[in-house]
Image (spheres, helix red, strand yellow):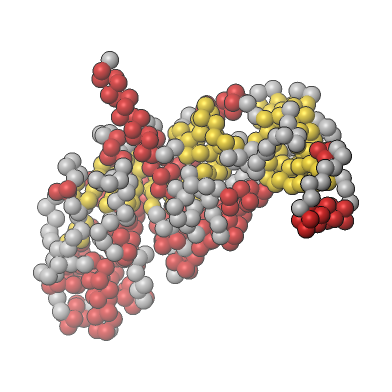
Amino acid sequence: MIGRVIGGSAGKVLLRIKSNVRVDIGDILIVEENGFKYYIKVVNALINSLLPGQFIDDIAGQKLEHDLELRLFDEEDRFYRVCEAKILKIWHKNVFYPARNTPHYFAEVRPARSEEFKFLSDYDGIEVGNLRLGTKEMTDVKVKIPAKRLINHHVLISAATGKGKSNFAKVFIKGLFNIDQVSALVVDPHNEYYGNAGVKGLRDLRNNKLMYLTPKTQHYPGSEQLIIYGEDLNPGDFMEVINTSSPQNEAMNLARRIYGKKWLLELLVNNNIDDVFGAFKGKVRKETISALKRKLLNILHLGPDGLKGLIFTLEKREEPSIFAKIKKGVSSNKIIIIDTSLVGDLSERLITTSITRSLFKSYKRTKEEAPEKFNTLPELMILFEEAPRVLGKAVLERGSNVFAKIAREGRKFKVGLCAITQMPSLLPQEILSQMNTKVVLGIPSPSDRQAIINSSAQDINDEASEIQMLDKGEAIITSPFTNFPLPVKVHFFDNLIKDESRGKINIGLS
């Protein structure tokens, strides 16, 4: 026993703690009473005294000004620590129930035992770390999350710089390799998910489910060329990425109708402004066509010949499109990484948007036209960083895009988002609320913390202080698919790679 209940209200209890016991914010404790087991979590720590305030001030003054060592009669009884704790759930007859009552006065409080979290290892999902109670890591309690269930309900990973967002993402993606009927598209703007000479990545798993698309295949044996042909791009891909006026949008749609799949080649290379103006029959001004061409050339980054750049090309396609290759990879349950580390922000967004639109459109069409085939498609997760670039308030004020559509409709079509951001407050509340699972890894900004708290599927209002205090690799995972918000010490991805490599060596020696 480490304390007793001295008060409470709906969903909360007040505890008096033994003088020789340390209890931290985030600790999970147990109160057992009449066959009911209360799982309670410390959310605030205070000091209290039976002495009136003026006596405490006087004693502090004597110690401070005169450096006196005053010994007080029954000091441990007169000065004590109190903790506020929220009731997470009530366990009764092997079932968890919401907290609809409180334990009685003087009920005993004790530390939680490892076996009381056995249910965390029973989830059919991905092991992401060990249970964390305050600052203590319970290495014998593994935390799993039911990944297959939560993918199409969307995931948000949020934290300040250096708190471990990318590490969690790599641990999570690693777990997807071992789950059937799941695929993922990972946009890698820093070339850290696949890995390189100085960074451990998913390539170190040496798993044949991994597919890597990069413009620099010569450096990565087994990778595939990331090349996007102009004939596979549609006006809508550009409208969701660059700021275009209504006349410019009309010009792109006209070009697509007049020139067909060669619309970009004809608009940007084969014809001058007068030719295009004539083909449009004067429906769009020359100034509009000229401005549009500048915007399109800026995002495509074509070479000196005006036909081929690092990733985009207007040359005739002689092979299956990148979209067809990715769809085939998805249907084979591949984890697909797209290397966008060598291009600018707009080009990266065009790559991500066009591929995502193609996949989502394919899933929707399959469900409408071939329901039986749709049932065989894997759950698809699309992971991307810096979420406000495509889901931010300022972006969506200009109009919806494929990411917002997936956030609202994706679960009907087995497609989910895994968005990573440092500033969740920049996302609309509607989008945040659609992200049913949130992985919170330390957020110092009050506005960002509040945005996460207000949109979480589970009540984490009382965890505001803990979220601010989270150290690197410490997380709170809140999801409708877990019994309560899970405090986790996330595995370090590099250590997982070492352990896996060591296991393979041992197997070989045996």
Q: How many marks?
A: 0
User: Residue 15: x percent and y percent?
Assistant: 77, 39
Q: Residue furthest top?
A: 510
Q: Is residue 150 something one can see in this rendering?
A: yes
**Quadrant of residue 205 in the image?**
top left
In the figure, is residue 170 to the left or right of 15?
left
The one of 58 and 245 positioned closer to us in this rendering: 58
User: Residue 288: x percent and y percent?
Assistant: 28, 81
Q: Is residue 409 something one can see in this rendering?
A: no
Identify the residue shown where x is 30% and y is 60%: 348
In the image, residue 391 sits, relative to residue 17, either above or below, namely: below
The one of 256 and 89 positioned closer to us in this rendering: 89
User: Residue 336: x percent and y percent?
Assistant: 30, 44
Quarter holding the N terminus is: top right
**Quadrant of residue 482 in the image?**
top right
Quarter holding the C terminus is: top left
Identify the residue shown where x is 12% and y is 59%: 316
The one of 202 and 209 positioned closer to us in this rendering: 202
Identify the residue shown where x is 87% and y is 53%: 55
User: Residue 507: x percent and y percent?
Assistant: 29, 19
